Image (tube, rainbow, N blue to C red):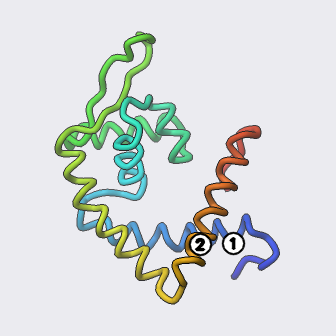
Amino acid sequence: MNPPDGCSTFLVRHAWLALRGVVAEALVQHDLSVAQFASLLMLDESPGLSVADVARKVSTARQSANEMLGGLERAGLVERRPHPNDRRSQQIFLTGAGRQRLAEAMPTVHEVEARLAAGFSAEEIAVVNAWLRRMTEAAAEGEEIPTL
């Protein structure tokens, strides 16, 4: 069933679920899930995130994020360090192996995105990306919105 054209929320959700499946298949060759890839990407951009930060950014429960990060830690891709200002919290950082795995997986994800975006002009893609960024920022400014 296709979502109604007049409801952007469901169109975005439908697109995300379809894209997530294709990306998940592609990431198998890098021994990463979509959530693991996203976590490596976020930690590369913002080193030292807490487990709660990662959970929020990947839209999952803290316990699920903690388990996922535990798997990345056992694989040697991330490391936990004590938070300098909060002894109850830990910060998560990529290891050299984590940066390498991310660098190896990134072209695969870009290839999938390019294949799915074939037929769209650079201007169309720029408009969609700008809209998605603006919607994300607007939602972040308001109250927390549960995932669908």
Position above or below: 32 against 77: below
- Residue marked by disc 1: 11
Question: For the residue marked with disc 2, what is the amino acid?
Answer: Ala
> Which residue shows up at 76% across the image and 40% down it?
142
Q: Quadrant of residue 68?
A: top left
Image side of residue 27 versus residue 130, left or right: left
Q: Secondary structure at mark 2?
A: helix
Return the residue nearer the eye: 119 or 74. 119
Q: Position of residue 26 (x, y in %)?
A: 33, 71
**Quadrant position of residue 3:** bottom right
Query: Is 89 above or below relative to 32?
Result: above
Q: Where is residue 5? Give x, y as percent.
A: 77, 79
145 to the left or right of 109 = right
Q: Amino acid at mark 1?
A: Leu
Q: For the point 74% across and 68% down, which residue is it?
A: 8
Please name the residue that numbered disc 2 is placed on. 15
Query: x, y (%) of residue 104?
Result: 22, 60
**Disc 2 to disc 1: CB gap under 8 Å:** yes
